[in-house]
Amino acid sequence: MGSQNSSYTVRVEGLSELQRNIRQLRNRELGKKVREANKAAGNVLLPQAVRESPDGKRDAKSSKKYRPGKLDKSVKVVASQKNVVIKAGSASRVPYAAAIHYGYRKRGISPNRFLYRAMARKSPQVAATYERLVAEVVRDYLESE
């Protein structure tokens, strides 16, 4: 099937400058708070991503590894100081997640880009949450100086 490395990206104006300034300050607590803000913004999207994921059904042709409901449970938020990523599936537990999301023509599986749909529906709330949380982190840091 090949590796799919596609993403729905939201660019935040001034973010790279903020990240550079945080690195130069070498303040671990500030970096940790930015990561927490990233994760909280990603968590706004999580319920919508789970709702958008397809509810599969087992049939006679289903793989032994396929278990309906495992895709929903595999959707998670991974955050760092630089970004936040919403992921679904894993190589060992839900190996078919990429085939569901991007499609697998040889197997007759058409794409169901549920993560992209979730982001499209929730991006205003994610952006507003992120902006509010990062502003709070910066304000708290400046007030503590």
Image (spheres, rainbow, N blue to C red):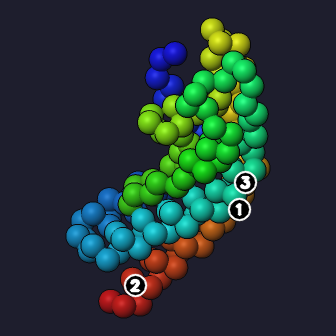
**Mark 3: which secondary structure?**
helix
Q: Residue 53: where, in percent of width, then height?
A: 71, 42
Label 2 – label 1 distance at C-alpha: 26 Å
The residue that appears at 41% across and 73% down in the rendered structure is 33
- Residue 94's disc number: none
As rendered, which of 34 and 2 lies closer to the eye? Answer: 2
**Mark 2: which secondary structure?**
helix
- Residue 48's disc number: 3
Q: Residue 130: where, in percent of width, then height?
A: 58, 65
* Quadrant location, the C terminus: bottom left
Q: Is residue 106 left or right of residue 136?
A: right
Label 2 – label 3 distance at C-alpha: 34 Å
Q: Which residue is mark 1?
A: 125
Relative to 34, residue 108 above or below: above
Q: Amino acid at mark 2?
A: Leu
Q: Which residue is mark 2?
A: 142
Note whether residue 42 is visible: yes
Q: Residue 140: where, in percent of width, then height?
A: 44, 85
Q: Earlier in the sequence, mark 2 or mark 1?
A: 1
Q: Is residue 110 left or right of residue 74?
A: right
